[in-house]
Amino acid sequence: MRAQSIPAAAASIIFGVVPLTLAGIVFTQVQFSFHSSNTINLLLGILLKIIVFSVFAPFLLVAFAHIGKREDYQISLKDYSLAMKQYPKYLLLGIVTGFYYAFIYLICFGMPSFGSDPILRLVWLVLVNYWMAIILPVPALMEIKQIGVFRAIRLSYRHFHDLRWNLYLMALLIGILASIATALLLVGLLYIVPFFWFAVRDYTRKLIDFELLEYHR
C-alpha cells in the first residue's frame, strides 16, 4: 500500500468519518434520539439517523468501486473521485443497513407505548453483529462480481457461512486500531482506512477463489 492512497483516505475521512463521528456525538447529547419518551420523536430520530448514516457512510465504501476491479494496492484521489460515480449504489447499501438496524431496534427495544422482553436486548446484540458479518464483504463482492446490492447481500448470506466471521474479527481489530488513530487526531486513519479497503477486498476475493459462491449446504 503506497502513500498515493493517503489523499483518497483523507477524502473518505473528511466526508465520511468526521460527519458520522460528529453526528454520533450530537445524537448522544440531545434528547431527540432513540430513547425519547415520545413515539413520534422516537420514529423521527430513527429516520434522521438512517438518513445521516446512509448519506455519509458511502464515502467510506466507494473506494471499492475502484480497488474491486484491480489487483494492486493503491488508489489515488482521482481514482476515488471517479469512483464517486457509484455513490448511488452505496447509498442504497447504506439505506438497507440503516432500515435493518432500525427494524431490529424497534423489535428488540420496543417503543414508548409498549415494551419488549429484556432478553431481546441480547438478541439485538447478536443481530447487530450478525448483520455486520454479512455486510462486510458486500462492497467488494459487488465490484468483483459486478452485481447489485441485494444479490451481493444474498450471496454473502447464503455462501460465506462461518468464514464470514474471520472477516468480521479482522474488521473488529481494524476498528480498534481506528479508534486509537482517531484519538491521535485522525492521522493514523490515513493509513488504516486504505488498509481496511484492501484487506476486505483481498479476503473477499480469496473466498470467491475458493469457489464458496458455488457451495451449497
Image (tube, grey):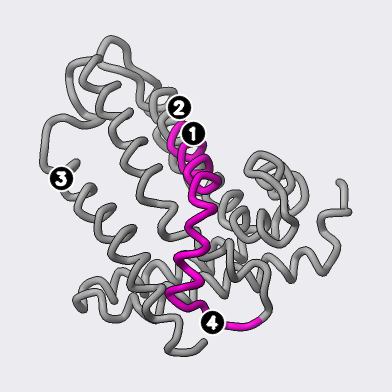
Image position, residue 120 (x, y; %): 44, 29
**How far is the residue under mark 4 from the one under mark 3?**
34 Å
Which residues are drawn in magenta?
Answer: 72-99
Q: Is residue 110 above or below residue 50?
A: above
Q: Residue at image x 56%, y 56%?
A: 136
Task: Characterize the magenta stretch by its predominant secondary structure.
Answer: helix
Residue at mark 4: 74
Q: Amino acid at mark 3?
A: Val
- Label 2 CA crowd tier, 10 Å (few <14, some 14–19, many 20+): few
**Numbered label attached to residue 92:** none
Please tell me whether mark 2 sits on a helix, a strand or a loop: helix
Q: Determine which residue is flagged by label 3.
A: 26
* Figure quadrant of residue 183: bottom left
Name the residue rendered at 21%, 32% in the picture.
33
- Mark closer to the observer (2, 4): 4
Sequence-earlier tag: 2 or 4:
4
Question: As rendered, which of 87 and 41 lies closer to the eye?
Answer: 87
- Check whether the beta carbons of the residues at disc 4 and disc 1 lie within 8 A of each other: no
Does 127 sit above or below residue 60? above
Say whether marks 4 and 3 touch (CB < 8 Å): no
Image quarter of residue 141: bottom right
Callout 3: few (<14), some (14-19), or many (20+) C-alpha neighbours within 10 Å? few
Task: Identify which amino acid the numbered label 2 is placed on.
Answer: Phe
